[in-house]
Amino acid sequence: MNPKPVVLCPIDFSEACCGALRYGAAIAEHFQSPLVIATVTDPLLADTVAMATGEDHLAHETKRELDRFYRDTYADRPVPVAHPRFEAVVGNPALEILALVERTHADLIVMSSRGDSAVRRMFFGSTAERVLRETAVPVLVTPPDGVGPAHLSNVPKLIHRVLVPVDLSAASDGQARTARAIADALDVPILLLHVVEPIRSNRPGFRSRPPISSERRSRAEEELAALVDRLSPWRRVESLVAFGEPSEEIAKVAHDRDARLIVVGLHGSPLRGGPHMGSVTYRVLCLARVPVLAWPPAIVCDPVVPERRVAGSGVGRTVA
């Protein structure tokens, strides 16, 4: 892996992408690493423009627009000390973004969950979903109304607290260590959250007995406390056990505890052979109004420079 992780930031020139671009630039500035700013043009539009101006002209003009968008994003503030590179490609947005990861050796994707307009919301929202389902590298998804950090030094204040929903499976240790490394680098506290889901049954008249619910909560508290202990000697770790529907509780706790970054784990699939987004992650992205970092189970973040290491089998279902 590149000792300076490459950050890939796909944009659609909407205002919603400015926040993602500022986060991507701040991360690149922190690591003094390359920042790849990319956009994907619809093939039909590309063919139409190419007939009038030529393919080379379209690519050149698109890269100029990317450069202008990057500088306009920092019109009222200093441009970060990053090393931007611009990529203009044509095709299916999600597939091209994933191809760019391979071609640019990107270690992190930073993108908005959706664009501004109704068309962009539909178009870019489905793109983010597809990328999350297929990615092999971490993806930081920013909310469309997030402004992002004005400067690298603003990131800790902007994040304030890192929320880590865990399901206490084998993958939770790697997920928690990743979140701890991020929180340690930002000097912010971390909150580990486990949500005990209600027992559901299609049997008429079924009701879960109170002692069972109490026992499930007690076991969860014990396992969560053990996970906190394994994160020692780092002391700024809190833990919380909640009861209810996971995605709703995660969004509620993030709001109530002022956690402005959620680190969720993409869980492995024995059938698909790799990490992919689950229904809880998708609903968290829909409900939460803060950045969400989706992290594949086989990657563990080093406190200084991210490294890819095996962190367990990753086949157990995480809270993602």
Image (cartoon, rainbow, N blue to C red):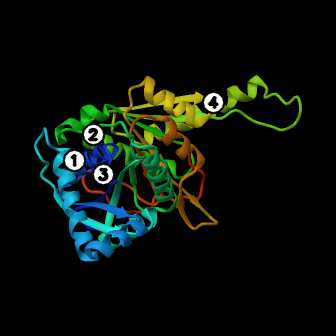
Tag in front: 3 or 4: 3
Q: Which mark is residue 148?
A: 2
Crowding at label 1, few (<14), some or many (≥20) Cα neighbours within 10 Å? many
Answer yes or no: is residue 222 visible.
no
Q: Which residue is mark 4?
A: 244
Crowding at label 2, few (<14), some or many (≥20) Cα neighbours within 10 Å? many
Crowding at label 3, few (<14), some or many (≥20) Cα neighbours within 10 Å? some
Q: Earlier in the sequence, mark 1 or mark 4?
A: 1
Q: Earlier in the sequence, mark 2 or mark 3?
A: 3
Q: Which mark is residue 26?
A: 1
Task: Please state the horizontal and vertical placement of residue 211, each as a whole percent of the image.
Answer: 75, 25
The residue that appears at 39% across and 36% down in the rendered structure is 290
Q: Earlier in the sequence, mark 3 or mark 4?
A: 3
Q: Which residue is mark 3?
A: 13
Residue type beneath disc 2: Gly
The residue that appears at 26% across and 69% down in the rendered structure is 58
Q: CA distance from mark 3 to mark 4?
A: 38 Å
Residue type beneath disc 4: Gly
